[in-house]
Image (cartoon, rainbow, N blue to C red):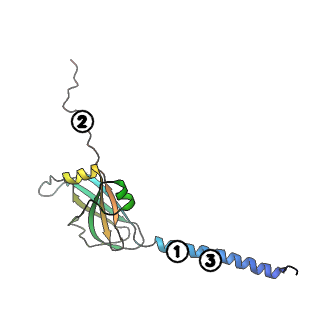
Amino acid sequence: MTPYAFNQNELLTLGIAAYAAIVSTFVLGWDAYKWLASGPKVDVSASTGMVLIGGHTPDPNTYISVTAMNVGDQPTTITNLGGMYFESWWRAYVLRRKPKEAFIVTEPSQAQRIPYRFEVGAQWIGLADQTDDIAEKAKSGYLFLILYTAHGGRGHRARVKIKPKKVTNEGSSNTAA
């Protein structure tokens, strides 16, 4: 039995079919990527040691400021601001379950009340009291503030890190006799 020999027309058809299969596979992959990457994307950060300036009465409290930006391509709704405290990095970053403590910030923003319609390109800022208990948790373990949205699932986390205060030597005298 002799092997089959392709003529020139069949080789051209086979080449075009292979090219079409490669291009269509690429287009399918690109559409899947676009579908997975679409929707609201929320970037969250937390800043500690914030104080309020101005107003009728001075506010002696210290706050943690939570800033969120919607950098995705669809709006979403901010539904809640909460927190979780983990004692070990394994539970905080790998398991992400069973925190030692969890809490809700009841009213994080007076100007942008929850539920808040979070448009594309918008920024949301909320505040949480930075109590001694919260500061100790941030220093000794892994404390996260979590912004929950309508599309978020587990929420968008920002780790709270308390920076140690710099000690100055204002009380010492540097005058030479």
Query: Would you say residue 62 is visible in this rendering?
Result: no
Foreground residue, 54 or 117? 117
Whole-number angstrom distance, CA of label 2 to CA of label 3:
66 Å
Q: Nearer the viewer, mark 2 or mark 1?
A: 1
Q: Residue at x 51, y 71 (%)?
A: 33
For residue 21, which quarter of the picture? bottom right
For residue 96, which quarter of the picture? bottom left
Q: Residue furthest left?
A: 57
Dot 3 or dot 1, earlier in sequence: 3
Residue 159 image point, x, y percent: 33, 56
Residue 128 image point, x, y percent: 22, 59
Residue 31 image point, x, y percent: 53, 75
- Left or right position of 148 against 55: right
Residue neighbourhood size for the residue with mark 1, other residues' Cα within 10 Å, grouped as few (<14), some (14–19), many (≥20): few
Mark 2 and 1 residues: CB-CB less than 8 Å, in contact? no
Q: Amino acid at mark 3?
A: Ser
Q: Nearer the viewer, mark 2 or mark 3?
A: 3
The quadrant of the picture occupied by the N terminus is bottom right
Whole-number angstrom distance, CA of label 2 to CA of label 1:
56 Å
Dot 2 or dot 3, earlier in sequence: 3
State the residue position of label 3.
24
Residue neighbourhood size for the residue with mark 2, other residues' Cα within 10 Å, grouped as few (<14), some (14–19), many (≥20): few
Whole-number angstrom distance, CA of label 3 to CA of label 1:
12 Å
Dot 2 or dot 1, earlier in sequence: 1
Residue neighbourhood size for the residue with mark 3, other residues' Cα within 10 Å, grouped as few (<14), some (14–19), many (≥20): few
State the residue position of label 2.
168
State the residue position of label 1.
32
Q: Amino acid at mark 2?
A: Thr
Q: Amino acid at mark 1?
A: Ala
Q: Residue at x 33, y 74 (%)?
A: 150
